[in-house]
Amino acid sequence: MDMVDRVAAAMEAALRDDKTLIVYVGSPGETVLVDGDVDFRLLARAAIAAMRAPNEKMVKAGIGALAVADYGMPEYGPEDAAEMTFSAMIDAALTSSEPQAPSSG
């Protein structure tokens, strides 16, 4: 399964329980009920493309992971360094901003 399919499947699974999609059209946190088909591959491609430009926290995490892989653990090869760096950057992205519950009122 390619990355777009994996991300699309994760998005679909996240929405499967309550069928609620949080959108940021109009006011942040506006809740829209999903009552039809959703093109999760289109959403997944947009989400992956948005991560093309990492934020500062992601860059710092990637530099730290790469330094460990390159200098701290010489038994790791380039594939290991790439995986460690990518994982560290994604972890940083996921902790950059936790999902916020919509405010009432």
Image: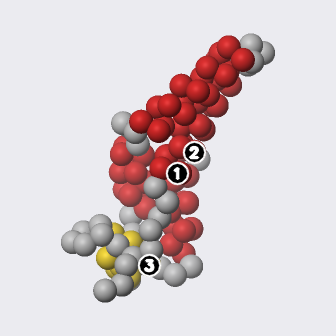
Residue 48, percent across and down?
A: 42, 46
User: Of residues 67 and 78, which is closer to you in this image?
Assistant: 67
User: Label 2 is placed on what type of residue?
Assistant: Asp
Residue 26, percent across and down?
A: 21, 72
Q: Is label 3 in a helix, a strand or a loop?
A: strand
- Marks 1 and 3: which is nearer the front? 1
Residue 84, percent across and down?
A: 64, 31
**Point 60% across, 23% down: residue:** 66
User: Label 3 is placed on what type of residue?
Assistant: Thr
Q: Can residue 74 be seen in this view?
A: yes
User: Marks 3 and 1: in contact by CB < 8 Å?
Assistant: no
Q: Mark 1 points at which residue?
A: 94
Q: Is residue 66 above or below residue 54?
A: above
Could you tell whether 94 is left or right of 103 in the image?
right
Using a 10 Å C-alpha cutoff, classify the residue at mark 3 as few (fewer than 14 neighbours), some (14 to 19) or many (20 or more): some
Residue 74, percent across and down?
A: 74, 13
User: Marks 2 and 1: in contact by CB < 8 Å?
Assistant: yes
Which quarter of the rendering shows the C terminus? bottom left
- Give the number of the disc on residue 20: 3
Q: How far apart are marks 1 and 3 (CA)?
A: 20 Å
User: Of residues 77 and 88, which is closer to you in this image?
Assistant: 88
Q: How far apart are marks 1 and 2 (CA)?
A: 5 Å
User: Of residues 32 and 85, which is closer to you in this image?
Assistant: 85
Could you tell whether 7 is left or right of 28 in the image?
right
**Point 45% across, 74% down: residue:** 101
Q: Mark 2 points at which residue?
A: 91
Q: Distance between the residues labelled 2 and 3?
A: 25 Å
- Marks 2 and 3: which is nearer the front? 2
